[in-house]
Image (tube, rainbow, N blue to C red):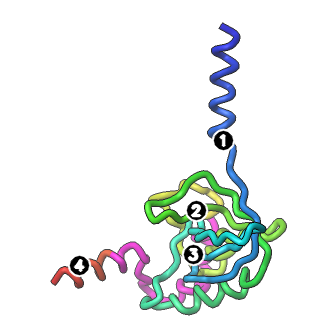
Amino acid sequence: MRWITAAVVLVITASLHADELRGKVVSIADGDTITVLDAEKVQHKIRLQGIDAPEKKQAFGTKSKERMSEKVGGEEVVVQWKEKDRYGRIIGEVMIGSRHINLEMVQDGMAWHYKQYSKSKELAEAEDLARKEKKGLWVDKEPVPPWEFRKTEREKSKK
């Protein structure tokens, strides 16, 4: 019986463990996607976990990308991650020292908390505060979430 308990603990521990990627940010696609070059000179596309930034053609899309660039462009980052998305991008938390970049983007009003994929109370609270303070994209009376914008664009392209 002991070995079964040990095996269960090992499986649970392994599933809780996040991988870590260290490297230099070499490209910013938008406000929630960056490219990191690791020590072996391999590039990794990173999608910031728990947030969704405005699309390039959307209001605040350019400003969101610029803010991400100000925060991480050329910087050494640590990405803590557990999975990849259907496009092969690493889904992770981007850190510079003790700074949590995912959270900062939401605090700055440059991204939404992506509630469909994240239950983070910290991100939810950050979005609520940014809305109340009318930071970034929250200056608009009715900002369109990126997932709705993408859906509308897909529907337009079908016509």
Q: In this view, does 116 lie above or below 158?
A: above
Counting from the top left corner in percent of width and height, residue 128 is at: 58, 70
* Residue at image coords 61%, 84%: 135
Mark 2 / mark 1, whichever is N-terminal? 1
Q: Tell me the CA gap for discs 3 and 2.
A: 12 Å
- In the figure, 72 relative to 45: above or below? below
Closer to the camera in the image, 39 or 46:
39
Task: Check the image and name the residue furthest to the front.
Answer: 40
Q: Which of 125 and 22 is in front in this view?
A: 22
Badge 4 density bin: few <14, some 14–19, many ≥20, Cα 10 Å: few
Front tag of 2 and 1: 2
Residue 90 is labelled as 2
Disc 2 marks which amino acid? Ile
Q: Is residue 60 left or right of residue 79?
A: left
Residue to which mark 1 is pinned: 16
Give residue 46's mark. none
